[in-house]
Amino acid sequence: MGAIRVLRSGTTLLLIMILLSVVGAVAASNTVPFTRLDEDSFPITANDLKPSGCSSLNLSNIVIGGNGTNGNDLILGSAGDDDLSGGNGADCIVGGGGNDNLNGGQKGNDILLGGEGDDSLKGGQDTDICNGGPGTDSGHPSCETKIDIEKLNPP
């Protein structure tokens, strides 16, 4: 009888320990610490995204492909061939890859960055910087400063 009593006590003790372990494991797996990561946000502006070649410009708009606005724009091309034109502001026009046609637009001191490919760059009425980048690039006389321009287009 003494052996049965010891066996019952041991079994009861073992069941209590298993029950406490299960309760502790369930409670531990449901604990989620408090964080505030989802409450942190800040806007990304055109000045945050502009390349270093356009560091002298204070840009206000981001335009993906196509034509710029009357404000100071960051106009971004794609990896393919693009036709990009600035508006009346001081624009940073980035062609990207491909054979691009970049036009500074009517007014504003623009910076045109051709990038990879054979690009054609044309400034505007004010003082414009045209940087063709890698490839065989052509520039218009309206580009007052020409960098990596191999050919000069007629006016």
Image (cartoon, helix red, strand yellow):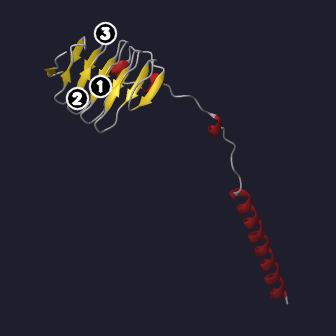
Q: Residue at x 35, y 32 (%)?
A: 77
| CA distance separating discs 2 and 3 | 20 Å
Pick whichever, 1 or 153, lies toward us.
153
Q: Residue at x 82, y 82 (%)?
A: 8
* Residue at the extreme top: 126
Which residue is under mark 3?
A: 127
Within-10-Å neighbours for mark 2: few <14, some 14–19, many 20+: many
User: Total of numbered circles in the picture?
Assistant: 3
Residue 51 in which image quadrant: top left
Pick whichever, 60 or 66, lies toward us.
66
Give how far across and how far down residue 44 sits, in percent. Answer: 51, 28
- Mark 1 or mark 2: which comes first in sequence? 1
Give how far across and how far down residue 154 sits, in percent. Answer: 16, 17
- Mark 2 or mark 3: which comes first in sequence? 2
Which residue is under mark 1?
A: 102
Pointers 1 and 2 in contact (C-beta within 8 Å)? yes
* Residue at the extreme bottom: 1
Image quarter in which the C terminus is found: top left
- Whether 40 is drawn above or below 85: the answer is below
Q: Amino acid at mark 2?
A: Asp
